[in-house]
Image (cartoon, helix red, strand yellow):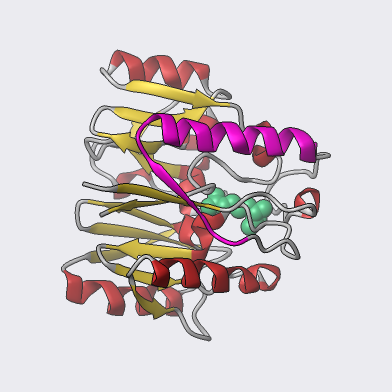
Amino acid sequence: MTRKALVRRPGPRLAEGLVTHIDRQPVDVDLAGRQWQAYVAALRDEGWETVEVPPADDCPDSVFVEDTVLVYGGLAVISRPGADERKPETAGTERTLRGLGYRVARIESPGTLDGGDVLKHDGTVWVGLGGRTNQAGVDQLAAHLEPLGATVIGVPLTKVLHLKSAVTALPDGTVVGYEPLVDDPSVWPGFLPVPEEAGSHVVVLDGTTVLMSTSAPRTKELFEARGLRVVAVDLTEFEKLEGCVTCLSVRLRG
Ligand SMILES: NC(=O)NCCC[C@H](N)C(=O)O
Protein backbone atom coordinates (compact mmCIF):
# COMPACT_ATOMS: atom_id res chain seq x y z
CA MET A 1 0.00 0.00 0.00
CA THR A 2 1.36 3.44 -0.88
CA ARG A 3 0.91 5.98 1.84
CA LYS A 4 0.91 9.63 0.88
CA ALA A 5 -0.23 12.63 2.89
CA LEU A 6 -1.20 16.01 1.50
CA VAL A 7 0.06 18.93 3.56
CA ARG A 8 0.04 22.70 2.99
CA ARG A 9 2.59 24.95 4.57
CA PRO A 10 1.24 27.70 6.85
CA GLY A 11 0.97 31.15 5.30
CA PRO A 12 2.06 34.52 6.69
CA ARG A 13 -1.50 35.40 7.79
CA LEU A 14 -1.92 32.30 9.98
CA ALA A 15 -2.47 34.36 13.15
CA GLU A 16 -5.65 35.81 11.57
CA GLY A 17 -7.24 32.35 11.30
CA LEU A 18 -10.85 31.88 12.37
CA VAL A 19 -11.82 31.08 15.94
CA THR A 20 -15.40 30.13 16.77
CA HIS A 21 -15.77 28.15 19.99
CA ILE A 22 -12.72 29.39 21.92
CA ASP A 23 -11.25 32.77 22.88
CA ARG A 24 -8.65 34.21 20.52
CA GLN A 25 -5.07 33.90 21.75
CA PRO A 26 -2.00 35.32 20.00
CA VAL A 27 -0.39 32.83 17.62
CA ASP A 28 3.40 32.70 17.27
CA VAL A 29 3.72 32.27 13.50
CA ASP A 30 7.42 31.33 13.63
CA LEU A 31 6.77 28.66 16.24
CA ALA A 32 3.81 27.43 14.17
CA GLY A 33 6.16 27.06 11.20
CA ARG A 34 8.54 24.95 13.28
CA GLN A 35 5.67 22.84 14.66
CA TRP A 36 4.42 22.27 11.10
CA GLN A 37 7.89 21.15 9.98
CA ALA A 38 8.05 18.70 12.89
CA TYR A 39 4.56 17.38 12.04
CA VAL A 40 5.63 16.77 8.44
CA ALA A 41 8.87 15.14 9.62
CA ALA A 42 6.87 12.83 11.92
CA LEU A 43 4.72 11.67 9.00
CA ARG A 44 7.82 11.03 6.89
CA ASP A 45 9.61 9.21 9.71
CA GLU A 46 6.59 6.89 9.93
CA GLY A 47 6.81 6.01 6.25
CA TRP A 48 4.41 8.52 4.73
CA GLU A 49 5.41 10.40 1.60
CA THR A 50 4.26 13.99 1.99
CA VAL A 51 2.93 15.94 -0.99
CA GLU A 52 2.63 19.71 -0.69
CA VAL A 53 -0.50 21.40 -1.96
CA PRO A 54 0.50 24.80 -3.42
CA PRO A 55 0.29 27.52 -0.75
CA ALA A 56 -2.83 29.70 -0.50
CA ASP A 57 -1.21 32.54 1.36
CA ASP A 58 -4.20 34.90 1.15
CA CYS A 59 -6.18 32.41 3.26
CA PRO A 60 -5.10 32.42 6.93
CA ASP A 61 -6.52 28.93 7.59
CA SER A 62 -5.05 27.24 4.51
CA VAL A 63 -2.69 25.06 6.58
CA PHE A 64 -5.77 23.10 7.71
CA VAL A 65 -5.79 21.28 4.39
CA GLU A 66 -8.00 18.43 5.59
CA ASP A 67 -11.03 20.69 5.33
CA THR A 68 -10.74 21.09 1.56
CA VAL A 69 -11.51 17.54 0.46
CA LEU A 70 -12.84 14.14 1.38
CA VAL A 71 -11.01 11.26 -0.29
CA TYR A 72 -12.71 7.87 -0.54
CA GLY A 73 -10.91 5.18 -2.53
CA GLY A 74 -9.98 6.74 -5.86
CA LEU A 75 -12.50 9.56 -5.57
CA ALA A 76 -11.72 13.04 -4.25
CA VAL A 77 -14.83 14.98 -3.25
CA ILE A 78 -13.72 18.60 -3.21
CA SER A 79 -15.41 20.34 -0.31
CA ARG A 80 -17.28 23.63 -0.23
CA PRO A 81 -16.10 25.08 3.09
CA GLY A 82 -18.78 26.47 5.36
CA ALA A 83 -16.77 29.64 6.06
CA ASP A 84 -16.65 31.97 3.04
CA GLU A 85 -13.09 33.02 3.92
CA ARG A 86 -11.99 29.42 3.29
CA LYS A 87 -13.75 28.72 0.00
CA PRO A 88 -10.74 29.71 -2.20
CA GLU A 89 -8.60 27.04 -0.50
CA THR A 90 -10.06 24.16 -2.48
CA ALA A 91 -8.61 25.00 -5.92
CA GLY A 92 -5.03 24.00 -5.08
CA THR A 93 -6.16 20.76 -3.44
CA GLU A 94 -8.16 19.84 -6.54
CA ARG A 95 -5.16 20.47 -8.82
CA THR A 96 -2.90 18.37 -6.64
CA LEU A 97 -5.31 15.43 -6.44
CA ARG A 98 -5.98 15.50 -10.19
CA GLY A 99 -2.22 15.39 -10.66
CA LEU A 100 -2.10 12.29 -8.47
CA GLY A 101 -4.72 10.60 -10.66
CA TYR A 102 -7.82 10.94 -8.48
CA ARG A 103 -11.30 11.24 -9.96
CA VAL A 104 -12.88 14.48 -8.78
CA ALA A 105 -16.41 15.33 -7.65
CA ARG A 106 -17.53 18.49 -5.88
CA ILE A 107 -19.87 19.66 -3.18
CA GLU A 108 -21.95 22.38 -4.88
CA SER A 109 -24.02 25.31 -3.57
CA PRO A 110 -26.18 25.34 -1.47
CA GLY A 111 -24.26 22.47 0.10
CA THR A 112 -21.39 23.17 2.47
CA LEU A 113 -19.01 20.63 3.92
CA ASP A 114 -15.64 20.80 5.68
CA GLY A 115 -13.41 17.73 5.50
CA GLY A 116 -12.87 18.00 9.27
CA ASP A 117 -16.51 17.05 9.73
CA VAL A 118 -16.02 13.66 8.09
CA LEU A 119 -14.93 10.59 10.05
CA LYS A 120 -14.45 7.37 8.04
CA HIS A 121 -13.94 3.85 9.24
CA ASP A 122 -14.38 0.66 7.30
CA GLY A 123 -17.10 1.78 4.91
CA THR A 124 -18.99 3.94 7.40
CA VAL A 125 -18.76 7.70 6.99
CA TRP A 126 -20.05 9.90 9.85
CA VAL A 127 -20.54 13.56 9.01
CA GLY A 128 -20.93 16.29 11.64
CA LEU A 129 -23.91 18.51 10.98
CA GLY A 130 -23.32 21.78 12.71
CA GLY A 131 -21.52 25.01 12.03
CA ARG A 132 -19.68 24.27 8.81
CA THR A 133 -21.47 21.36 7.15
CA ASN A 134 -25.16 21.49 6.23
CA GLN A 135 -27.71 18.83 5.29
CA ALA A 136 -27.33 19.57 1.56
CA GLY A 137 -23.61 18.93 1.93
CA VAL A 138 -24.24 15.60 3.67
CA ASP A 139 -26.79 14.59 1.02
CA GLN A 140 -24.37 15.41 -1.81
CA LEU A 141 -21.57 13.52 -0.11
CA ALA A 142 -23.86 10.51 0.30
CA ALA A 143 -24.77 10.65 -3.40
CA HIS A 144 -21.06 10.54 -4.28
CA LEU A 145 -20.02 7.82 -1.81
CA GLU A 146 -22.96 5.43 -1.61
CA PRO A 147 -22.36 4.08 -5.14
CA LEU A 148 -18.89 3.16 -3.86
CA GLY A 149 -20.43 1.09 -1.06
CA ALA A 150 -20.16 3.60 1.79
CA THR A 151 -22.85 4.25 4.40
CA VAL A 152 -23.10 7.97 5.19
CA ILE A 153 -24.56 9.01 8.56
CA GLY A 154 -25.22 12.62 9.65
CA VAL A 155 -24.31 13.29 13.28
CA PRO A 156 -25.46 16.35 15.27
CA LEU A 157 -22.63 18.66 16.32
CA THR A 158 -23.04 21.77 18.47
CA LYS A 159 -20.15 21.95 20.95
CA VAL A 160 -17.04 22.07 18.76
CA LEU A 161 -16.00 23.25 15.32
CA HIS A 162 -15.84 19.95 13.46
CA LEU A 163 -16.85 16.34 14.08
CA LYS A 164 -13.17 15.37 14.27
CA SER A 165 -12.66 18.10 16.90
CA ALA A 166 -14.91 15.89 19.04
CA VAL A 167 -14.19 12.30 18.00
CA THR A 168 -11.76 10.23 15.94
CA ALA A 169 -11.22 6.48 15.52
CA LEU A 170 -8.35 4.26 16.69
CA PRO A 171 -6.93 1.70 14.24
CA ASP A 172 -9.38 -0.97 15.48
CA GLY A 173 -12.33 1.35 14.86
CA THR A 174 -12.94 2.31 18.50
CA VAL A 175 -14.25 5.87 18.44
CA VAL A 176 -12.63 8.08 21.07
CA GLY A 177 -13.67 11.49 22.35
CA TYR A 178 -13.73 13.89 25.27
CA GLU A 179 -17.26 13.38 26.51
CA PRO A 180 -18.11 16.97 27.54
CA LEU A 181 -17.68 17.96 23.89
CA VAL A 182 -19.50 15.06 22.24
CA ASP A 183 -23.19 15.68 21.55
CA ASP A 184 -24.25 12.03 21.46
CA PRO A 185 -21.67 9.32 22.25
CA SER A 186 -24.35 6.62 21.78
CA VAL A 187 -23.89 7.03 18.00
CA TRP A 188 -20.80 4.81 18.37
CA PRO A 189 -21.14 1.46 20.13
CA GLY A 190 -18.01 0.96 22.24
CA PHE A 191 -17.28 4.70 22.43
CA LEU A 192 -14.14 5.25 24.54
CA PRO A 193 -14.04 8.46 26.63
CA VAL A 194 -10.62 10.08 26.96
CA PRO A 195 -9.53 12.36 29.81
CA GLU A 196 -8.33 15.35 27.73
CA GLU A 197 -9.83 17.34 24.89
CA ALA A 198 -6.69 17.04 22.75
CA GLY A 199 -6.81 13.28 23.36
CA SER A 200 -9.86 13.11 21.08
CA HIS A 201 -7.69 13.63 18.04
CA VAL A 202 -5.65 10.85 16.51
CA VAL A 203 -4.27 10.25 13.05
CA VAL A 204 -3.96 6.55 12.29
CA LEU A 205 -0.45 5.96 10.92
CA ASP A 206 -0.69 2.18 10.65
CA GLY A 207 -2.47 -0.74 12.30
CA THR A 208 -0.78 -0.15 15.66
CA THR A 209 0.45 3.46 15.60
CA VAL A 210 -1.30 6.80 16.07
CA LEU A 211 -0.11 10.39 15.82
CA MET A 212 -1.43 12.80 18.44
CA SER A 213 -0.69 16.05 20.25
CA THR A 214 1.64 16.33 23.24
CA SER A 215 -1.19 18.30 24.89
CA ALA A 216 -2.83 15.01 25.95
CA PRO A 217 -0.26 13.04 28.02
CA ARG A 218 -2.86 11.10 30.05
CA THR A 219 -4.65 9.96 26.93
CA LYS A 220 -1.31 8.91 25.45
CA GLU A 221 -0.82 6.62 28.46
CA LEU A 222 -4.33 5.24 28.04
CA PHE A 223 -3.68 4.42 24.39
CA GLU A 224 -0.28 2.87 25.19
CA ALA A 225 -1.96 0.67 27.81
CA ARG A 226 -4.22 -0.58 24.98
CA GLY A 227 -1.11 -1.65 23.08
CA LEU A 228 -0.84 1.28 20.69
CA ARG A 229 2.38 3.05 19.82
CA VAL A 230 1.92 6.81 20.08
CA VAL A 231 3.91 9.42 18.17
CA ALA A 232 3.31 12.83 19.79
CA VAL A 233 3.97 16.26 18.30
CA ASP A 234 3.63 19.82 19.68
CA LEU A 235 0.71 21.64 18.04
CA THR A 236 0.01 24.48 20.49
CA GLU A 237 -0.10 27.23 17.85
CA PHE A 238 -2.64 25.33 15.71
CA GLU A 239 -4.71 24.39 18.77
CA LYS A 240 -5.15 28.14 19.45
CA LEU A 241 -6.98 28.25 16.07
CA GLU A 242 -9.16 25.20 16.81
CA GLY A 243 -6.92 23.03 14.70
CA CYS A 244 -5.61 19.62 15.69
CA VAL A 245 -3.48 16.74 14.49
CA THR A 246 -6.01 15.55 11.89
CA CYS A 247 -6.59 18.81 10.06
CA LEU A 248 -2.97 19.41 9.02
CA SER A 249 -2.96 16.60 6.46
CA VAL A 250 -5.08 14.47 4.15
CA ARG A 251 -4.05 10.85 4.35
CA LEU A 252 -4.13 8.92 1.06
CA ARG A 253 -3.98 5.17 1.40
CA GLY A 254 -3.58 3.97 -2.15
N1 LIG B 1 -10.31 19.95 10.42
C1 LIG B 1 -10.05 20.84 11.35
O1 LIG B 1 -10.10 20.56 12.55
N2 LIG B 1 -9.80 22.08 10.95
C2 LIG B 1 -9.50 23.16 11.81
C3 LIG B 1 -9.82 24.46 11.17
C4 LIG B 1 -9.53 25.62 12.05
C5 LIG B 1 -9.77 26.97 11.42
N3 LIG B 1 -9.32 28.02 12.28
C6 LIG B 1 -11.22 27.18 11.07
O2 LIG B 1 -11.94 27.76 11.89
O3 LIG B 1 -11.66 26.80 10.00
Residue at 62% of width from left, 52% of height from top? 63
Residue 174 location (% of width, % of height)? 27, 36
In the rendered image, the vertical position of residue 228 relative to residue 203, given as above or below: above
Q: Name the side, left or right, on which 254 lies relative to 210.
A: left
Q: Picture quarter containing residue 189?
A: top left
Q: Is residue 157 visible?
A: no
Is 53 contained in the magenta span?
yes
Work out which residue is located at the far right of the displayed protein and give it: 26
Q: Nearer the viewer, residue 247 or 194?
A: 247
Chief SS of the magenta region: helix
Q: Quadrant of the C terminus?
A: bottom left
Q: Name the side, left or right, on which 16 lies relative to 92.
A: right
Residue at 29% of width from left, 77% of height from top? 144
Q: Is residue 74 visible?
A: yes
Is 129 contained in the magenta span?
no
Q: Picture quarter containing residue 242?
A: top right
Residue at 60% of width from left, 27% of height from top? 234
Q: Picture quarter containing residue 124?
A: bottom left
* Magenta span of residues: 28-54
